[in-house]
Amino acid sequence: MHTARCAVPLLALALITTTCGGGDHATGAADGLTSAATAPAPEGSLPVGDGGGAVTIVAQNISFDTTEISARVGESLDITFDNRDNGLQHSLHVRDTATGDQKTEIAAGPVTQTLQVTFDRAGEHRYFCDVHPFMTGTITVE
Ligand SMILES: [Cu+2]
């Protein structure tokens, strides 16, 4: 009998390197992205500029809704002129500001315009519409 069995035992080198520490879980959970976006949100209220005032004058039905305004010498007054007369032209013309007369362009509504005026002397200052001179008001400056 001649049975030659070449039984080469494959010693499987089971080098199973078990890397312990299975997966680094959230180690650095305390860093970074805490988005504390503190947005200072000024709302849509009328901005009162530093040291000045603001007022809105509406032109509607060929008249100003505001005809009495107060202001102070040397302080700027931001006027929003809101022409709501559809298809009708108005302007806002302010007399005797620190830089002379100031006025918006004559424009047909609906349109909103702005005018910033400053007065260098006290008293009553008239304003009116160039198209309709009977549309008038007074800014009392003190
Ligand atoms: Cu007018």
Image: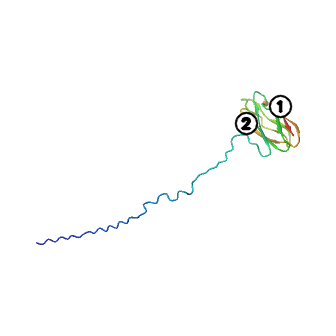
Q: How many labels does the image show?
A: 2
Decide if residue 22 is on the left or right side of residue 80: left
Quadrant of the image containing the N terminus: bottom left
Q: Which residue is drawn at 80% across and 43% down?
A: 52
Mark 2 = which residue? Answer: 112
Decide if residue 87 is on the left or right side of residue 121: left
Q: Position of residue 137 (x, y in %)?
A: 83, 32
Callout 1, which amino acid? Thr
Q: In this view, does 45 lie above or below 1?
A: above
The foreground one among 134 and 29 is 29
Label 2 element class: strand
Distance of mark 1 from mark 2, alpha carbons? 18 Å
Decide if residue 116 is on the left or right side of residue 37: right
The crowd level at tag 2 (other Cα within 10 Å; few <14, some 14-19, many 20+) is some
Disc sitting over residue 136 in the figure: 1
Label 1 element class: strand
- Residue 58 falls in image quadrant: top right
Answer yes or no: disc 1 within 8 Å of ligand 1: no
The foreground one among 19 and 130 is 19
Q: Where is residue 81 in the image (x, y as percent from the top left)?
A: 76, 36
Q: Residue at x 83, y 37 (%)?
A: 70
Q: Is residue 12 above or below residue 80?
A: below
